[in-house]
Amino acid sequence: MAVIAEQLSKVLGLPVRQLEPLLALAAEVKLPKGDFFTRPGERADRFAIVLEGLVRHYYVDARGKESVKAFRGPLEVSGPYAELISGRPSRTFIQALAPARLLCLQWEVLQRAADASPELSKMLRRFAEAQFVNKEQREYEFLQLTAEERYLQFCRERKEHLGHVPLHQIASYIGITPVALSRIRARLARKR
């Protein structure tokens, strides 16, 4: 746990001693490739810090079409955030795209601990702020960047995961069809 605390300390900008109460509440879970952390309809009662591997967050509509919401890799937080906060059942599939190790925290236990700890409350506020900034950034990208720019940005930000993410999932994440992504990739290959 000491190595994890050191890594999280760097990412979150908090001293290790402030992370220790949080880590004491956590349990490690291993997800083989293809297994789910959360599925729609399940009680949303936990979230996780990805230690190793890669997970995707996605929805499936009534026709069976998948819409990829997010990818989360090492030292990123994964969970059905809105449902955790609102107390609703999950609407989100969270699936391992590669074997994953997760550090899981029960939401209610974390909330009680945060009520008793100003440091933990501050960390949760920082987490919520970071989620808001990420969501704003994603909205900006959809409204201001072209599909090609979104693809190139995805490749820059997730280059270590490109081998684990099928192209149709990348297309869904950046909001285009697999055919449109194929055309973008062909155009970029011709430019090189």
Image (tube, rainbow, N blue to C red):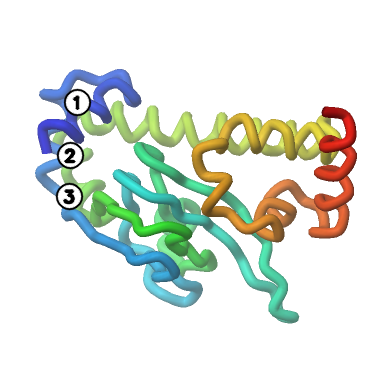
Does 33 sit above or below residue 170? below
Q: What residue is pinned by disc 1?
A: 6
Residue 183 in view of the camera = yes
CA distance for labels 3 and 1: 15 Å
For marks 3 and 1, give the one nearer the viewer: 1
Q: What residue is pinned by disc 2?
A: 22
Q: Secondary structure at mark 3?
A: loop
Residue at the outermost bottom position: 63
Please rate how many residues cluster around mark 3, counting C-alpha atoms within 10 Å: few if below 14, some from 14 to 19, many from 20.
some
Circles 2, 3 touching at the beta carbon (< 8 Å): yes
Q: What residue is pinned by disc 3?
A: 26
CA distance for labels 2 and 1: 13 Å
Mark 1: amino acid:
Glu
Q: Position of residue 77 (x, y in %)?
A: 39, 43
Give the residue drawn at x 34%, y 53%.
47
Give the residue drawn at x 49%, y 53%.
82
Q: Position of residue 72 (x, y in %)?
A: 47, 46
Q: Nearer the viewer, residue 46 or 101?
A: 101
Q: Would residue 14 appear left or right of 87 to someone viewing this image?
A: left
Quick one: label 3 or label 1, which is nearer the N terminus?
Answer: 1
For marks 2 and 1, give the one nearer the viewer: 1
Q: Position of residue 63 (x, y in %)?
A: 74, 80
Q: Would residue 21 appear left or right of 110 to someone viewing this image?
A: left
Mark 3: amino acid:
Ala
Picture quarter containing residue 61?
Answer: bottom right
Quick one: label 2 or label 1, which is nearer the N terminus?
Answer: 1
Q: Nearer the viewer, residue 136 or 29?
A: 29
